[in-house]
Amino acid sequence: MGAPDAEDTQINVDVANRLDAGTPTNSDLDIGGIDPKEERAFLWRLDCWFLTIGFLGYMFKYIDQTNITNAYVSGMQEDLHLYGNQLNYFTTYFNIGYMVMLYPSCIIISHFGPSKWLPGCELVWGILTCCLSTVTSYKQVYGLRFLIGFFEATAWPGNFTLMSQWYLPHEVALRMSIYNMAQPAGAMLSGAMQGALSSNLEGAHGRAGWRWAFLINGICTIAVALAAFFILPGYPERPNRLAKFYLTPRHLEIALARGRRVKRKPQIGITPKRFLRCFTFWPLWAVAISWSIGSNTQPSTYFNLWLKSLKNTNGTKK
């Protein structure tokens, strides 16, 4: 990272000035100073860039998370001589890594900034997904799955934090719904990709189809991560310099004025003490318990295994 240029310095000065309540400007005297058409155009621009890259990132995150089951029924079990509960352990190690990183990431992102932290973690788990195409034993899969879960844990809370900083309260629900639609889209695409790759690339260059699936999924994730370095907007008061091609100083003025409309405070670093205080709120426990019960009792997780059980080892129907 080099020193900011004169234009970046001026933008940051302007942003800082507008955060000072004692220095009113045309845009913060009242929100009517912003043309509604201009505000709608800003929202459309934000949706087209930020929401799109977030959707793609979360979709490939879910593909990288669930492709282990598709690989298992597409030849991985036989090639690695897997048996017993080893498939369950693949998911267990992923979830352990996810839980270890989930909360620290919320603290780190408040200090380090989302425009570098989120794409950086996505880039790492994309590389690790590619590494799954080279495994030769279940122990290697355990380690890689733990690390993939560790870095994937940053995506969901990080992107929701960003949405809460750029969108107004009544706008957030729609964007969160669109963002969460990436999960079923990823599940649908994961099965389709695995089926196509297993049948069309099986044996290509001496590699099994399930290995090609991990490699191609990882490459797609890496491509999205590299694009995210230039597209994720950062925080309104700490914007991403690389996103200037679609977020001009005027757009930052609009974003800051919209925040003042709802008396939103600038994002500041979370201290461990403030973070631990959230565990004293009962809604957190209610949502966490209901979420874990609801998401872990779905039979669809093992639907692929049931389909595989309908055939003999030679591929004929039972």
Image: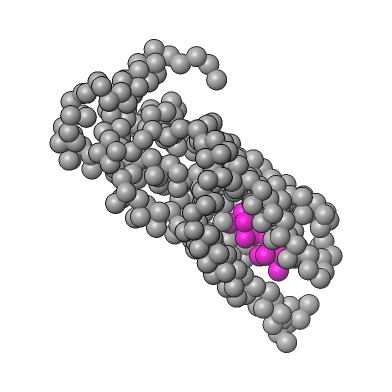
Note whether 14 is above or below 164 in the view shown: above
Q: Is residue 264 visible?
A: yes
* Residue at 50% over, 33% down: 269
Q: Quadrant of the C terminus?
A: bottom right
Q: Position of residue 153 (x, y in %)?
A: 59, 48
Q: Seen from this angle, which residue lies furthest top?
A: 6
- x and y percentages locating residue 227 in the rendered image: 50, 37
- The colour scheme used here is one colour
Q: Nearer the viewer, residue 130 or 62?
A: 62
Q: Position of residue 221 (x, y in %)?
A: 57, 46
- Residue 127's place in the image compared with 213, above or below, is above
Q: Is residue 53 visible?
A: no
Asked whether 222 falls inside the magenta stretch, the response is: no
Instruction: Looking at the picture, tell me which residue is in the foreground, 201 or 254.
Output: 254
Magenta segment's dominant SS is helix
- Figure quadrant of residue 263: top left
Splitting the image into 4 quarters, where does residue 198 fall?
Answer: bottom right
Toward the bottom, the furthest residue is 318
State the image coordinates of residue 19 (x, y, percent, origin top left). 32, 26
Q: Is residue 65 left or right of residue 9?
A: right
Compared across the picture, whether 177 is left or right of 125 comes to left
Q: Quadrant of the N terminus?
A: top right
Q: Residue at x 24, y 20 (%)?
A: 23
User: How many marks overall?
Assistant: 0
Residue positioned 33% across, 44% down in the render:
167
Bounds of the magenta span?
63-75
Q: Nearer the viewer, residue 150 or 203?
A: 150
Residue 317 higher or lower than 191, as above or below: below
